[in-house]
Image (cartoon, rainbow, N blue to C red):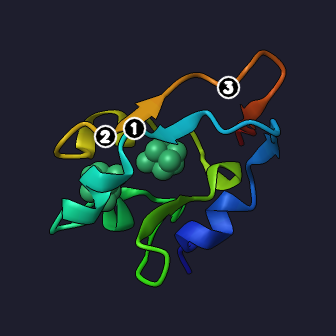
Amino acid sequence: MSESITDKLFTIRFKCDDKSHLVIKEADTCEKCVTKDCNYFCPADVYDWNLKLKTTTVAYENCIECGTCRIACPPNNIEWVYPKGGYGMTYKYG
Ligand code: SF4
Ligand code: SF4
């Protein structure tokens, strides 16, 4: 039986910084964004449109640094920096 994405994510180790390495540049741009692509392209479900607060929430702790959001937000509204040294992802192979 093949493993689900969720199962595979359990094989990755994170060390979270207390400061997000993913920043929404302009809240207004998200409000005007019709397609909310970030809610669909992130494999780790980091982005979520909060209808009540009218904001995109960013669960940066779950980021697996795949880099998709650096290029996939249509108006380029996500600022992406590498996590500080010692923080972020550790991949286990095998
Ligand atoms: S795709 Fe980009 S502009 Fe649209 S909601 Fe997500 S972060 Fe905001
Ligand atoms: S780098 Fe990949 S996993 Fe991290 S927030 Fe962007 S799309 Fe999601």
As measured in the structure, the alpha-carbon distance from the residue carrying label 2 to the one carrying label 1 is 5 Å
In what element is the residue under mark 1? Answer: loop
Image check: 55 left or right of 89?
left
Identify the residue at image location x=67%, y=25%: 83
- What residue is shown with label 3? 83
In what element is the residue under mark 3? Answer: loop
Label 1 near ligand 1 (CB < 8 Å): no
Q: Nearer the viewer, residue 9 or 39?
A: 39
Label 2 near ligand 1 (CB < 8 Å): yes
Disc 3 vs disc 2: which is toward the camera?
2
Image check: 34 left or right of 39?
left
Disc 3 vs disc 1: which is toward the camera?
1
Identify the residue at image location x=64%, y=61%: 8
As measured in the structure, the alpha-carbon distance from the residue carrying label 3 to the one carrying label 1 is 17 Å
Identify the residue at image location x=80%, y=28%: 87
- What residue is shown with label 1? 25
- What residue is shown with label 2? 77
In what element is the residue under mark 2? Answer: loop
Q: Residue lying farthest top?
A: 85
The quadrant of the rendering that contains the N terminus is bottom right
Q: Is residue 4 above or below residue 14?
A: below
Residue 32 visible within the image: yes
Q: Residue 59, position in %: x, y? A: 62, 58
Q: Earlier in the sequence, mark 3 or mark 1?
A: 1
Q: Amino acid at mark 3?
A: Pro
